[in-house]
Image: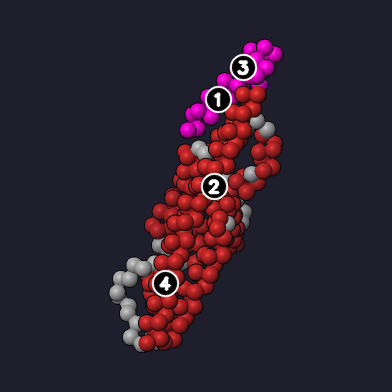
Amino acid sequence: MNRKFVFYEIIMAMLSLLVVFILTIQITINLTPTQSLILDYIDTSIWTIFLIDYIVRLFLSKNKWSFIKNNKLDLIAIIPINSLLKSIRIVRLSRLVKLIKFTKFLRTIIFFSKFKSKINKFITTNNLNYVIFITILIVFSGAIGISIAENMSFGDAIWWAYVTATTVGYGDISPATGIGRIIAAVLMLVGIGFIGMLTGTIATFFLDKKTVYKSYKEEIIEGIKNKLDEFDKLDHKDIDDMYAVLKSLKNDN
């Protein structure tokens, strides 16, 4: 397995998630001009990275049209829709603002799908996707329960449930009732279990990748050995091809 490629894919997935976070803030919160400008700058910087990534991969691909068909989401993600809308002078300002908000919402969906596609193989390892769903459900249920039991605002309850489940435990909010303490204990156990599951999934994911690559590598080497058994029948091109393959396998180690 090419570790550099895996690391690169993780970085691109995190950038996609960061764009989702930025766009969500821009859609849901009234920002100051300075805050909006900073987020736009970060968004544009990430967009530039995705644009360069797409162009390089398109350039390196052997079949350009096949690459475009198989990477539609990436192509849509790099279309500068906001800039195109802002350049249209005939649209009224009020309508333009609504259109920009709508395109931000669409971009949020696109980048979340992009993030999901990159981590899909990981989150389905050991059924982690179900564990994540159940954990989130329990945390929200715990927040609702603690909000009722401790007469706490839902915002504070969500914060407390998250901090408790991650076993950080700042201590700024502590349950005083018996029910509240039981909820806290359950959330702690769920949090510890989730962290253990996540750690095990990461290990399994990379071990599986390594096993698959090892099997692929052994299969390639075995094929080359079979060809070498008929060495007299090989021409210079066959030998050059085998050398290139072996060199590529060696460089991936």
Residue at disc 1, secondary structure: helix
Residue under label 2, please give it. Answer: 208
> Does residue 246 lie above or below 109 as drawn?
above
- Is residue 137 highlighted in magenta? no
Residue found farthest to the left: 171
Q: Earlier in the sequence, mark 4 or mark 3?
A: 4
Tell me what residue is drawn at x 42 percent, y 80 percent.
183
Q: CA distance from mark 4 to mark 2?
A: 28 Å
Q: Is residue 161 above or below residue 6?
A: below
Quick check: 242 left or right of 29? right
In this picture, is 205 found above or below 63? below
Mark 4 highlights which residue?
189
Residue at the (60%, 17%) spot, across then down: 240
User: Which residue is label 3 attached to?
Assistant: 239
Check disc 2 and give the amino acid type.
Asp
Position of residue 68 measured from the top left corner of the image (x, y, whole percent): 66, 40
Q: Quadrant of residue 175?
A: bottom left
Q: Nearer the viewer, residue 214 or 42?
A: 214
Task: Specify whether 70 is left or right of 19.
Answer: right
* Residue 51 visible in this rendered orientation of the protein: no
- The label on residue 246 is 1
Instruction: Examine the structure image and report whether residue 237 is included in the region drawn in magenta.
Output: yes
- Real-space CA distance between mark 1 and mark 2, rounded to the nearest whole angstrom: 22 Å
Q: Secondary structure at mark 2?
A: helix
Contact check, label 1 and label 2, Cβ < 8 Å: no
Q: Quadrant of residue 100?
A: bottom right
Q: CA distance from mark 2 to mark 3?
A: 32 Å
**Residue at 50% of width from left, 32% of height from top?**
252
Residue type of the residue flagged with mark 3 = Ile
Q: Residues within 10 Å of mark 3 (few under 14, many from 20)?
A: some
- The residue range painted magenta reads 227-253
